[in-house]
Amino acid sequence: MSFEQLLFYLFSGVLLLSGISMVTVRNPVYAALSLIVCFFTSAAIWVTLEAEFLGIVLVLVYVGAVMVLFLFVIMMLDINHNHLKEGFIKYLPVGLLVALVIAVEMILVLNGGGFDGEKYMQGQRHGADYSNTKALGEVLYKQYLYPFEIAAVILLVAIIAAITLTLRRRPNSKSQNIDQQVRVKREDRVRLVKMEAEK
Amino acid sequence: MNFDMSAFAIASPEVFLLAALCTVLLMDLWVAKGAPLITYLATQLALWATALLVLGKSFNSEGAFITGLGGMYIVDGLGDILKISILLISSLTFAYSRKYLREQNMWRGEFFVLGMAAILGMMIMISGYNLLVLYLGLELLALSMYALVAMQRDNSNASEAAMKYFVLGAIASGLLLYGISMLYGMSGSLNIIDLKAYFQAQAGLHTNILFLFSMTFIVAGIAFKFGAVPFHMWVPDVYQGAPTAVTLFLGSAPKIAAFALLIRLLADGLGAGQSSWSQMLMLLGLLSIVMGNLMAIAQTSLKRMFAYSTIAHMGFVLLGVLVGTEDGYSAAMFYTIIYALMSAGGFAVLILLGNRMSDPDNLDCLRGLNDRHPWYAFIMLLIFFSMAGIPPTAGFYAKLSVIKVVMGEGYLLVALTMVVMSVVGAFYYLRAIKLMYFDEPEESTPIVAEVDFQVLFSFNGLLMVILGVFPGVLMGICSIAVSTSNL
């Protein structure tokens, strides 16, 4: 086994384990942390495949931004999802059995051959001057420009949809009115009461 | 491969609609602030202009199909006709929706922006000639639809419907995508034109287990989008839970887009495996017709009844496609367009009967419609007749042409089931007509609608008769459209 293969198996093993733990752990914070490990190891696998740009973006965007936000929200909301996992052990045998049957069937079908390996380029090694970012850009902005544009429209719709669904005035929601807060005067807050001195 | 931006000229209707969408979005924020009527009018204008663009381009194609954008985009007669019908029917549904949106405090510009995004997704699907583009178009449509269904945030039924629709839609997309990945693994290309050539060159396709495996996933994904039994569970719940204006939109134009997806993927890309997928479609179609018609009888909610009747109608479309001939495709196409028109009219009556106080859903709201307003009752009668397939309405001719094609290919038992189940289906349509004409009205509040609603609703109902008496025009257009596409 070459060093590279060793790395691959190491990263894949960690990826699978953290993926399983992400679904099974009870504490949502641990689940989010497992997901971060997942992202890290998949980024590492991408880097070994010479897809440096994708690896770096995965760490920067998902680990750096999305997951931190996620963790923040989980900690802030402090939701206890334990009741959602109540039937987990009870349904596990049945679920596992069904999953196993489907998996075996799919493996039997897919191992039967039929995928034409010659159609795909064998992985080539590139020199140090090879730019993965440039190659990605060539594919994304030339060959697949049309699907790329549609994906951009989908993101636009996602923004519109998210804002439509969340931006609404609720009559009983508590919000600050900064304008009024700044203009507040002493008289609005403090009431001086003259009292007779107690004897 | 290298292409510059001028390659996008072939997709000018889509580009225009996207530009219009962004303009309307911004306009709604600045110009039309607090006056969504301007947004509404701009949306209608955009839809009609896009339809004109499609029409203008279709005269240049000279009866052949053109592909562009690296083989990912196709212009053909089929696509043009389907796009124009989607744009016009959507314009009709938006016009109906106006009354409902005003009354239910949903009168906001986002409804039209999201609606336009859904229409853009449908158009991308229709002229998509690449598996990736088809999938992205489908997602654009689905995402806008989820948001539209959930738009009434304070209505728990709508939220539940949106959740169900979202989860089941995601599963369906996953199935479809998995099938697509298998196809890519076998053929090494995502372009439908390459897939077609690859599978036509393969011998013994009906015993190729990998091909059957991927096709099963694709058929299941498409059946989900059609709402065919046994993938129909979401249809009644979503139709009932969604605001009526959204149900109206959801139940009409997207069915045409689903038909386009079916044609592009199965009839065109996997056309060589017709003997295999026709078996699956037959099962799906027959189950849909039987289950849809039987379940519709038991419904007391008009929206749920229409949902089950949709399932039955979609069964007819699938059975029309399964024969795999040009006649079959054009009969199914005719059926789909007629269905979209009928469905628009059917849901419009719910909007018509509603007012600021109530958002009717029950069959009883039809009671005594004839006493309250004879003309609306008559128009509704025509639409119900058309759904049931009673001559001389368009629904009769649509059913007849599908049954004729199916019989012509020797599927006698299938045709017999279709006829028997149509008779069963006639029961619940006639029950609704009985409620309108022979029962006493429960309410006496006058039915008020604006002039444009009245004119369009009357036109919609009369169109059922006009298209039923002269079906040759639309039927001819459909068969020309199918014959000029690359099937």
Image (tube, coloured by chain):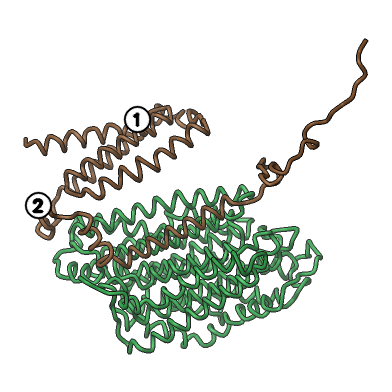
Q: Identify the subunit bearing mark 1.
A: A
Q: Position of residue B474 (x, y in %)?
A: 46, 84
Visible in this render: residue A137?
Answer: yes
Three-letter amino acid code at the position of disc 2: Gly
Question: Would you identify the image quadrant in which residue A88 lies?
Answer: top left
Residue at numbered disc 2: A127
Q: Position of residue B356 (x, y in %)?
A: 74, 61
Vertical comparison of A70 with B64: above or below: above
For mark 2, does the 10 Å Cα neighbourhood hold few (<14), some (14 to 19), or many (20 or more) residues? few
Residue closer to the observer: A97 or B38: B38
Q: In the rendered image, which quarter contains the N terminus of chain B? A: bottom left
Question: Would you identify the image quadrant in which residue B193 lies?
Answer: bottom left
Q: Colour of chain A?
A: brown
Mark 1 or 2: the one toward you: 2
Vertical comparison of B257 with A56: above or below: below
Visible in this render: residue B270?
Answer: no
Tell me what residue is drawn at x 35 percent, y 43 percent: A62
Tell me what residue is drawn at x 14 percent, y 55 percent: A130
Q: Position of residue B166 (x, y in %)?
A: 47, 51
Q: Position of residue A151 (x, y in %)?
A: 37, 60
Dot 2 lies on which element? loop
Dot 1 lies on which element? helix
Whichever of labels 1 and 2 marks the residue nearer the N terminus, that label is 1
Vertical comparison of B481 with A82: above or below: below
Tell me what residue is drawn at x 35 percent, y 61 percent: B135
Chain drawn in green: B
In the image, is A11 to the left or to the right of B258? Answer: left
Residue closer to the observer: B47 or B138: B47
Residue at numbered disc 1: A93
For mark 1, does the 10 Å Cα neighbourhood hold few (<14), some (14 to 19), or many (20 or more) residues? few
Three-letter amino acid code at the position of disc 1: Pro
In the image, is B1 to the left or to the right of B287? Answer: left
